[in-house]
Amino acid sequence: MNNQTPRILTLQIQEPAFTYFNDLRKQYFPAQLNYLDAHITLFHHLPATDVITRVLEQVAAQHAVFPVEVTGLLKLGRGVAFQLQSKELVQLQEYLQQQWQAWLIPQDRQKFRPHITVQNKVSPAEALLVYEKLRSTFQGFNITGLGLSLWEYLGGPWQKIKDYAFSG
């Protein structure tokens, strides 16, 4: 891999859902550590290469928007996330994983478990309280995957490089 900063790939979702998850993240994530908006990470460490962007352009042009089901809450030990299920999302991530296999770090070769983290880096007791609070009123709902976003990792914060809207 080259010395350029790694790229992160996330799924774009519609605005009301993004706002809902981001508001929860602002409420429950430690403020001094919360320099990212709510997100669904597909890949954590991609190289800065034209191969990545060419595949993203092709996939976005051929892919239609799709539903993603928010099915429950996950205990992360020191945080809380919303669990997601979507056949289309898993198939998309697996396709990209196959295309980029040669460049993937071990974390990105693992089985994909889509989620949105709204709390992390707190004590286990605090995480359990938030988990129980959110779980007590949780009802499943659907959101929509609209496209992909490619980000540059800046040692903590991310900078957006480009959005790839689904148009197929």
Image: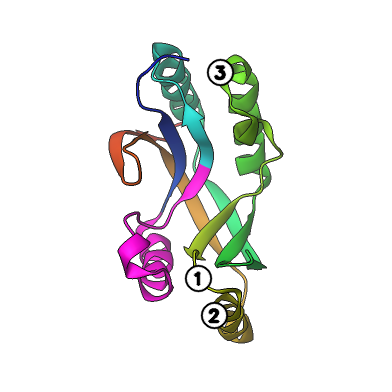
Residue 26, image x and y in percent?
35, 70
Left or right of residue 65: residue 34: left
How would you rate the neighbour count of disc 3 (Cα within 10 Å): few for under 14, some for 14-19, many for 20 or more? some
Residue 13, given in percent of the width and then of the height, sits at: 43, 52
What distance separates the C-alpha of mark 1 from that of mark 3?
Answer: 33 Å
Q: Is residue 49 magenta?
A: no
Name the mark nearer the viewer: 2 or 3.
2
Q: Position of residue 57 (x, y in %)?
A: 41, 22
User: Which label's residue is closer to the chain start, 2 or 3?
Assistant: 3
Disc 3 secondary structure class? helix
Q: Position of residue 154 (x, y in %)?
A: 31, 38
Label 1 element class: loop
Q: Of marks 1 and 3, which one's residue comes earlier in the chain?
A: 3
Tell me which amino acid carries mark 1: Val
Q: Residue at x 57, y 19 (%)?
A: 100
Element marked by disc 2: helix
Q: Are marks 2 and 3 in contact (CB under 8 Å)?
A: no
- According to the image, label 2 marks what residue? 126
Count how many numbered circles sit on residues in the image: 3
**Could you tell me the amino acid type at mark 2?**
Glu
Residue on which disc 3 sits? 103
The relative height of residue 144 versus residue 130 in the rendered view (above or below) is: above
Q: Which residues are magenta?
A: 14-41
**Residue at label 1?**
122
Q: Nearer the viewer, residue 54 or 107?
A: 107
The mark found on residue 15 in the picture is none
